[in-house]
Image (cartoon, rainbow, N blue to C red):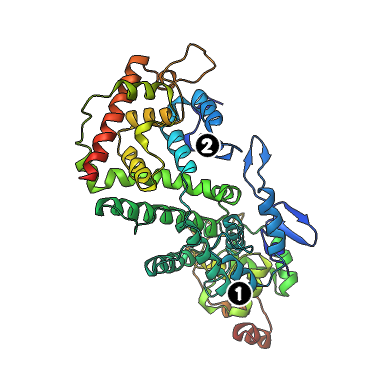
């Protein structure tokens, strides 16, 4: 660990202080002694802790209700798991498990992982089943499907001609390419 | 299915009490996993057994005097446990609303009696804290956010930290800052007042028994420059200007200034405060 990493972090120090059972004078003095460079922040937080205004039992104004309502709308606009990519994280062994669980050839799930399927062409029923299998929400799955198609990893190419960028196709096309029986394709597309 | 069983499908650790399962926190301190305070953990186990409608009813109780009052730490747990629920989930929405109301109860009331400028600062503090907390929640909806674990342990202190930052920002931005920053320390201090500075952790001029005065006094402290505010806060904590004992914390040692300098800061802070408060009374 270099010297830079040894420097105490303001947030970590303030939080450690706040985690103390007692944030009274003794603890404060100890932290001031150890971290005099954070005296302003430690003293500000100590005062806020000792002067917590709690209007418990009070009513909430109409303005507050509107503010909360607006915050809720923004909150649910956030895509759960948006910071991670459930399809990109799928391992080869998981593709086999999906294949067995949903009774479809492995190549269908490879196409999904490579984002070669138009998300809107997939029935909600199938999306739901897939989301349950890979343990994420439908919103998160759709967000992942809507990403740009990518080339399969680990595929060797001997041609000197640069391969064309993969294109998105309908889920129906993927199923037909996998030689799924027509009645099953209809079933999967309609979601019945 | 129990609420707890739907949580953290990635296999994070859980602890069990009786028939219910409550997810444990992921935050660590000194290499150990942080845990909720016992009353919160116990209450969570009871709340886990309730139906959604009953859970919401109890969480929406704002009166601390009610036997069914639910600690904010518990409400936060249930909001986080629904992080992947859709916008259409009515229980999720009501729990979210109940949680933000708890945040609001710990913020300055903009309807308090005072000058317009004071209320403007209060409004800004409310907006900033609520926004920062909402951002933390949104990040947690996106992906588990360990910063919120602290709020599940000590909700009030977590809000206090957000408030401390918001106060600093609001004061800097407030219109009245421009006016008040021009207020200079003036007037002499009596010998009695000077001796109070040296010895007391409850200075006479604070008159802190009066709630309105106390509020205005704290507002005035917020407007002091950092080097004066830090001294007045340490005086209020009873920390001496200097100490011969190396084990005793002193203002002089903490700030790396001579005892004479920090005493001057203290006097300047008191005189500035007095002027700020006198000006507000006019």
The part of the image, by quadrant, that contains residue B82 is bottom right
Task: List x then y, in percent, for residue B8.
Answer: 66, 58
N-terminal label among 2 and 1: 2
* Above/below status of B86 relative to A90: below
Residues at discs 2 and 1 in contact (Cβ within 8 Å): no
Write the residue at 42% across / 43% down: B164
Q: Is residue A27 left or right of residue A178?
A: left
Write the residue at 63% across / 87% down: A186
Nearest the eye: B123 or B62: B62
Q: Is residue A92 visible?
A: no
- Which numbered mark, 2 or 1, is in the foreground of this view? 2
**Which class describes the residues within 10 Å of circle 2: few (<14), some (14-19), or many (20+)?**
few
Task: List x then y, in percent, for residue A96.
Answer: 73, 64
Could you confirm whether marks 2 and 1 are on the same chain?
Answer: yes
Q: Which element type, helix, strand or loop, lies under badge 2?
A: helix
Tell me, for residue A67, which label it has, or none: none
Q: Is residue A99 left or right of residue B70?
A: right
Pointer 2 chain: A
The part of the image, by quadrant, that contains residue A41 is top left
Name the quadrant of the N terminus of chain A: top right
The part of the image, by quadrant, that contains residue B50 is bottom right
* Above/below status of A133 relative to B25: below
**Which class describes the residues within 10 Å of circle 1: few (<14), some (14-19), or many (20+)?**
some
Task: List x then y, in percent, for residue A59.
Answer: 45, 66
Q: Which element type, helix, strand or loop, lies under badge 1?
A: helix
Tell me, for residue A127, which label it has, or none: 1
Task: List x then y, in percent, for residue B11.
Answer: 71, 55
Mark 2 sits on what residue?
Answer: A12
Pointer 1 chain: A
């Amino acid at each position: 660990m270099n010297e830079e990493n040894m420097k105490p972090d303001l947030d970590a120090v303030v939080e450690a202080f706040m985690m103390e059972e007692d944030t009274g004078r003794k603890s404060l003095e100890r932290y001031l002694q150890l971290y005099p460079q954070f005296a302003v922040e430690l003293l500000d937080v100590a005062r806020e802790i000792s002067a917590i205004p709690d209007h418990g039992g009070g009513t909430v104004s109409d303005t507050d209700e509107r503010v909360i309502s607006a915050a809720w709308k923004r909150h649910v606009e956030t895509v759960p798991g948006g910071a991670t990519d459930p399809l990109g994280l799928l391992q080869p062994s998981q593709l086999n498990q999906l294949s067995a669980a949903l009774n479809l050839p492995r190549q269908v799930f490879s196409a999904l992982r490579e984002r070669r399927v138009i998300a809107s062409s997939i029935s909600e029923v199938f999306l739901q089943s897939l989301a349950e299998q890979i343990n994420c929400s439908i919103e998160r799955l759709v967000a992942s499907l809507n990403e740009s198609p990518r080339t399969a990893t680990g595929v060797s190419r001997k041609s000197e001609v640069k391969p064309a960028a993969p294109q998105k196709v309908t889920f129906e096309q993927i199923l037909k390419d996998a030689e799924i029986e027509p009645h099953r394709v209809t079933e999967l597309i309609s979601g019945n | 299915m129990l609420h707890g069983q739907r949580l953290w499908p990635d296999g994070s650790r859980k602890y069990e009490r009786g028939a219910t399962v409550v997810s444990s926190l992921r935050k660590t301190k000194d290499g150990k996993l942080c845990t909720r305070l016992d009353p919160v953990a116990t209450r969570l186990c009871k709340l886990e057994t309730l139906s959604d409608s009953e859970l919401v009813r109890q969480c929406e109780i704002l009166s601390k005097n009610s036997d069914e009052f639910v600690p904010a730490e518990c409400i936060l747990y249930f909001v986080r446990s629904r992080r992947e629920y859709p916008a259409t989930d009515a229980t999720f929405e009501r729990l979210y609303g109940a949680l933000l109301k708890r945040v609001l109860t710990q913020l300055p009331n903009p309807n308090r009696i005072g000058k317009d400028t004071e209320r403007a600062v209060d409004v800004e503090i409310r907006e900033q804290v609520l926004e920062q907390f909402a951002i933390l929640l949104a990040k947690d909806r996106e992906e588990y956010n360990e910063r919120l674990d602290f709020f599940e342990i000590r909700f009030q202190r977590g809000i206090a930290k957000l408030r401390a930052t918001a106060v600093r920002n609001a004061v800097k931005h407030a219109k009245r800052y421009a006016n008040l920053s021009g207020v200079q320390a003036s007037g002499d201090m009596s010998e009695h007042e000077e001796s109070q500075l040296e010895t007391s952790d409850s200075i006479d001029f604070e008159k802190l028994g009066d709630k309105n005065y106390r509020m205005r006094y704290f507002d005035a402290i917020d407007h002091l420059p950092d080097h004066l505010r830090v001294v007045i806060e340490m005086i209020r904590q009873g920390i001496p200007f200097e100490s011969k004992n190396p084990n005793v914390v002193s203002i002089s040692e903490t700030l790396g200034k001579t005892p004479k300098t920090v005493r001057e800061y203290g006097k300047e802070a008191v005189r500035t405060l007095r002027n700020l408060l006198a000006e507000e009374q006019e």
